[in-house]
DNA sequence: ACAAGCGGGACTACCCGTTGTT
DNA sequence: AACAACGGGTAGTCCCGCTTGT
């Protein structure tokens, strides 16, 4: 499609607005007309950049997944730079997400992937495949960190590491829903803190000494 | 509105189909035409029972919240009948939800409340108010149980009980999303088990002796 | 679909207008908007009666083929009532078509079947199947009459009867095109007269004595 | 307009594809987008060569009419070279058309002029004028040959020569329609043979001695 | 001689809701 | 309690043609 700077900018503006609107109204709830009104382009422009609304949804979730993956990797990397202890590393990573979700007056607008999942029969399979790929990336990356932790701190109870890894995302996704509905941004941060506590209780013999 | 047995049955059939379809496609993704096609009634029948599509959405979330509340209360009550220990009571309650979500080949189809929340700007405020009422009911009821528990088992770490209570729902909602997307019903059960473990680690000095 | 007198009338009005317009502009050249404007109904009405524009095209060609078949059979039957000689019978039948196409100031608006054939890749296969069925019906019915004729009047030259039968329709279809383009209604009648002459030359030993 | 070899080639490629597509889908059924997709050029290229879609249609029918006229004249000329008898000359000419339409597995794709005529209200008057010019050219040229024939072979029945001349084209156009619809290339050849038989029966006292 | 980007409107299809009737 | 028929508007898509830039 487009490669020129002008066209690329238009395309990005459309995707930006689409993301906001889909998080508010769902994919089916966003019409191309609404979208282009908000962006200030014409239908001709929209369909120049995207073959269809579904094609746009695909481009959007691809971009979202890419950004999510990049941020996730960065948080893991920062954790690993800031501490040499594997447990501390993961706690820092979770803490960076707390910062992301806490530093704003409004609740975080939600997760595009969850939005797509709640319209499973509307969005194309390919979009869900991208979502699943991302879910599994989180699971694998966190599971690996948990494995390193459990080598250093043998867990006090028998624990299934992949599902414990899933818990990170599960808590974020679940907290988004309550936070959005109750319009309370604090909820996501609180739940991530519980996740950190849980990790510490599992892996640290004496929680009294931890933050 | 009608109360005759025939009319009531039609009304319920419409709501049943609407619930299935909304969980698959979102509220905006379900058209009245699709809905009546699937139920096998005409538009006249639909608009006889509901003043509008939004009116139907309201009736639906009301019915859903009522059923949810009833089941939730029953699970709490059964926990209280089956044990006299407040911690065990709550663990049993969580366990009953595990049974609900685990006894099926398919993943649980999702939570209607979450579905509405991801179309916040589409559904009417009144519907979200009903959702929030339910979220707060869970928070309050579980917080009260946690308070009772913490009287018997002082927590090993300082813990915020309302947000810990929220965790129950948060985990269910978050796990629904992963379970739906990855088409893996086990995820919800696994996450609820982690929730039970977390409670035990917080309140029980020696987890090795607990179920 | 519709069965009430009111609905049926609307449906027929739509088909009537569609036929006129398609003969003037082709199927692709007629938009649903143009059509409903001309008929004076709304889009809701159109899509109540027809699932799609293609569905309407199918209903239209079905109706056209039915009427064509009925008129064709009637012309054959009238020929057979008005004479007992098989050759005269067929000549009368052709003559009845001359009357049909000659009694008007304007050229005959054309044949819907030909219109569809010139948009072969646009209309649905099922529509073309109906067209073909009609073409073959003409071929078979006329071939049978030619066979009867050739029993009474052995042809002066060896002649392939099915293709001679096709000639009837071929001439009508071809003459329509010239007549429309040159805006000369006489062309169709002239060509049918040539068809009659041809038949007489083939089957009558002494053409000088024939009409 | 361009005259460079490259530009001219692009222009011709566009016209070639347009002709194929219009014969399959009608003028309205072919969009500029489809067309340029198939040719593999951009819209810029299309509108560089043609001021509008209608302009292209005009250029196309002009080219078609030119080619048609050239081929027609050549067939007449070859007939006149191959025989000195005026009847034989015309029969040869018809025979050359049989060769043209018979030497292919697929039915002849149809006549662009007929295609335009079946969208009379869509194409511009100027295009139809070109079509009519061609129709009249055929009529006049064949009528003149028939006149020469009738001088040598006085017709056995009184016959209108211009309409008999029209019959040549009428049969071709009509046969195209049946041939396309029934997907049977033999039909055109068969009908042209009937046309030759008809001429022989009119002009030749003893058809048994003719080819 | 062409390519990218886009404007503005037309296209088919479908939307939700109303009507009159049974 | 439900049905057929329909109104009026919006959905997503595609249309043709213009502009701007090599």
Image (cartoon, coloured by chain):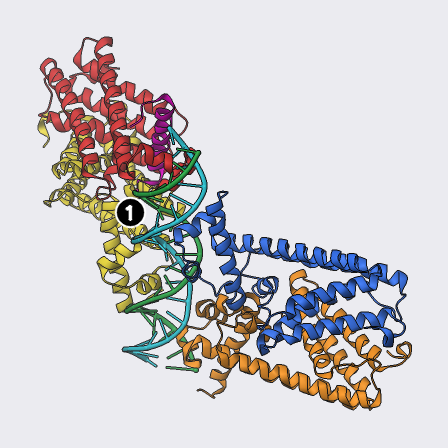
Chain colours: A yellow, B red, C blue, D orange, E green, F cyan
Q: Is residue C121 above or below residue B25?
A: below
Q: What stretch of residues is rendered in magenta?
A: B1-28
Mark 1: few/some/many CA within 10 Å (<14, 14-19, 20+): some
Q: Which chain carries label 1?
A: A
Give the side of residue C107 with respect to residue A106, left or right: right
Q: Main secondary structure of the magenta part?
A: helix
The location of residue B48, given as percent across then percent down, is: 33, 33
Relative to the observer, which residue lies in front, A6 or C84?
C84
Q: Nearer the viewer, residue D37 or B129?
A: B129
Q: Where is residue B176 in the image (x, y as percent from the top left)?
A: 30, 33
| Count of numbered circles in the view | 1
From the viewer's side, name the closer residue of A145 and A165: A165
Locate residue C163, reporting x and y percent.
77, 65
Up/down of C83 relative to C177, above or below? above
* Location of residue F3 with respect to B155 vertically, above or below: below
Residue ID at (33%, 22%): B100
State the residue in front, D79 or C109: C109
Q: In this view, does A169 lie to the left or right of B24?
A: left
Membership of C20 in magenta stretch: no
x, y percent for residue D44: 39, 76
Q: Quadrant of the C terminus of chain A?
A: top left
Magenta stretch contains residue B24: yes
Q: Can residue C122 be seen in this view?
A: yes
> On the image, which quarter does residue A159 sit in?
top left
Is any part of residue D107 visible from this angle? no
Q: Report which quarter residue B197 is drawn in.
A: top left
Q: Is D187 placed left or right of B123 in the picture? A: right
Q: Residue at x 65, y 70 (%)?
A: C102
Name the residue that disc number 1 marks. A29
What element does badge 1 sit on? Answer: loop
């Amino acid at each position: 499609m487009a490669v020129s700077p002008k066209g690329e900018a238009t395309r990005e503006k459309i995707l930006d607005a689409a993301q906001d609107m889909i998080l508010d109204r769902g994919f089916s709830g966003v019409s191309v007309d609404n979208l282009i009104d908000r962006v200030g382009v014409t239908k001709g422009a929209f369909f120049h950049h995207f073959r269809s609304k579904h094609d746009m949804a695909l481009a959007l979730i691809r971009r979202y997944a890419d950004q999510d993956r990049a941020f996730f990797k960065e948080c893991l990397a920062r954790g690993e730079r800031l501490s040499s202890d594997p447990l501390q590393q993961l706690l820092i990573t979770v803490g960076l997400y707390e910062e992301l979700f806490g530093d704003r007056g409004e609740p975080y607008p939600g997760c595009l992937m969850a939005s797509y999942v709640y319209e499973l029969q509307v969005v194309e399979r390919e979009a869900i495949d991208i979502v699943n790929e991302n879910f599994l990336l989180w699971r694998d990356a966190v599971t690996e960190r948990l494995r390193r932790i459990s080598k250093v701190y043998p867990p006090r109870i028998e624990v299934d590491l992949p599902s414990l890894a899933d818990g990170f995302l599960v808590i974020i996704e679940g907290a988004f829903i309550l936070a959005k509905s109750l319009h309370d941004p604090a909820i996501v941060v609180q739940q991530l803190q519980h996740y950190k506590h849980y990790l510490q209780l599992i892996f640290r013999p004496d929680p009294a000494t931890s933050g």
